[in-house]
Amino acid sequence: METILVVNAGSSSLKFQVFGIAGGLNRLLKGNLEGIGTAPHLTIKSASGERVLTEDFPSDIVPDLPAAMRLVGERLRERHQGQLIAVGHRVVHGGPNHIRPARIDEGLVRELERYTPLAPLHQPNNLAPIRVLLERRPELVQVACFDTAFHRTHDRIADHYAIPVHYFEEGVRRYGFHGLSYEYVAERLAEIAPNVGGGRVIVAHLGSGASMCALNAWRSVESTMGFTALDGVPMGTRCGQIDPGVLLYLLMQHRMSASQLQDLLYKESGLKGLSGISNDVRNLLASDAPGAMLALDHFVYRIGLNAGALAAAIGGLDAFVFTAGVGENSPIMRARIGEKLGWLGASLDPARNEAGDVLISSDRSKVAIYVVPTDEELMIARHTLALIAAPITGTNGPNSRKVGYDS
């Protein structure tokens, strides 16, 4: 059976899924190697969620992402004898030029390395498995799927900052992120609510990383994230929107270095910074500490505030969609955010919300409210399959269909 491997690499984890392609995409396996470099733990499950493998390793066996790729390759070969024909990767930042997925070569990797300062938590880790496979399996087709690409439909005016225009030309502009998630949700809306989904829609991707996107006629019009994945609503450890003057103050008055400032904004802020307890909404909901209440109240307030701005960008609101970890799994947070949308005519049905129905708005609501689980890995697999089905030239030629899971 011919298969596609999807890789989503983080700083300390490697998520992966295997899809068969006979007769259309068919999810076969999914897994996660977490705790890389500290307490590596590998889990592989079937598409139905049945556990296939659970295994722990000493930290020196899996010290980094290249080692993680080798280990995952070995375990997949042992448990699945499919014929791997391509690997699709999530790459957070594609810069201003990539409006669609791209076949990977050394030149593309060098280009994408330039965007590491714009996504320091993600880009180096996204590129690490790509480099491993380019070195060990150069004949294997690899496809980069960019989180920024979906937002390249923005009007030029939406992506400008009010600074001298030559900075825009060199790439200092608003990009938007979580595009693979928004693209998948848009496609799902076309299936479950075509009349509403094709109108004016706000999608809230609420997880450890959080952002919101305004859609009109299925295309991205505006996003809360901008030049980097720091902007917009507060996140687990990232600050969200902040006055640039605060950064100047910290640099000049606190004498913070650039690396200290980067750590503060990316790793010590957001819900973690406000609460002083945790970056996990579940932990904060379970706590009666004042800091936990402050963090959640701020999170809800900023989501409501940004919903108003996004509704203005698309001239009203026909539907609001919750997705990602918090959006899909927390009725409490959906209810609290739903209250902030009341002025737009939105009203949740408590029973539908608690049950996690797809449509959770009340019958009297003027705005349809949905819960749509995202599936970025399936989106990556679709893009990868589309590219390998296209005419193949150069080094990624027909022989690339003769490889296994070795890495």
Image (cartoon, helix red, strand yellow):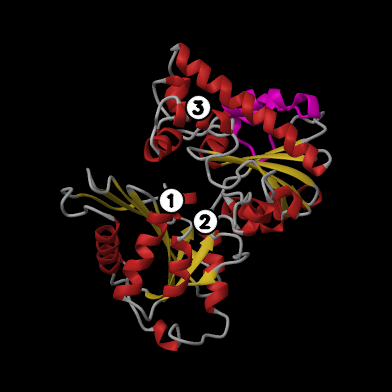
Q: Which of marks 2 and 3 is nearer the N terminus?
A: 2
Q: What element carries label 3?
A: helix
Q: Specify the quadrant of the image occupied by residue 78.
A: bottom left
Identify whether 249 is placed above or below 32: above
Find residue 344 and report its horizontal and vertical position in percent: 80, 29
Q: Quadrant of the N terminus?
A: bottom left
Three-letter code for the amino acid on which mark 3 is drawn: Tyr
- Is residue 242 visible to the viewer in this orientation of the structure? no
Are there few (<14), some (14-19), or many (20+) residues within 10 Å of tag 1?
many
- Front: mark 2 or 3: 3
Q: What element carries label 1?
A: loop
For the magenta stretch, what is the residue range? 332-360
Q: Earlier in the sequence, mark 3 or mark 1?
A: 1
On screen, residue 288 versus residue 334, left or right, reads: left
Find residue 77 and report its horizontal and vertical position in percent: 28, 69
Question: Which residue is the site of mark 2?
Answer: 93
Three-letter code for the amino acid on which mark 2 is drawn: His
Q: How far apart are marks 3 and 1 (CA)?
A: 27 Å
Three-letter code for the amino acid on which mark 1 is drawn: His
Between residue 367 and residue 235, name the one nearer to us: 235
Q: What element carries label 2?
A: loop
Contact (CB < 8 A) between labels 1 and 2?
yes
- Front: mark 3 or 1: 3
Question: Which residue is the site of mark 3?
Answer: 249
Question: Which residue is the site of mark 1?
Answer: 122
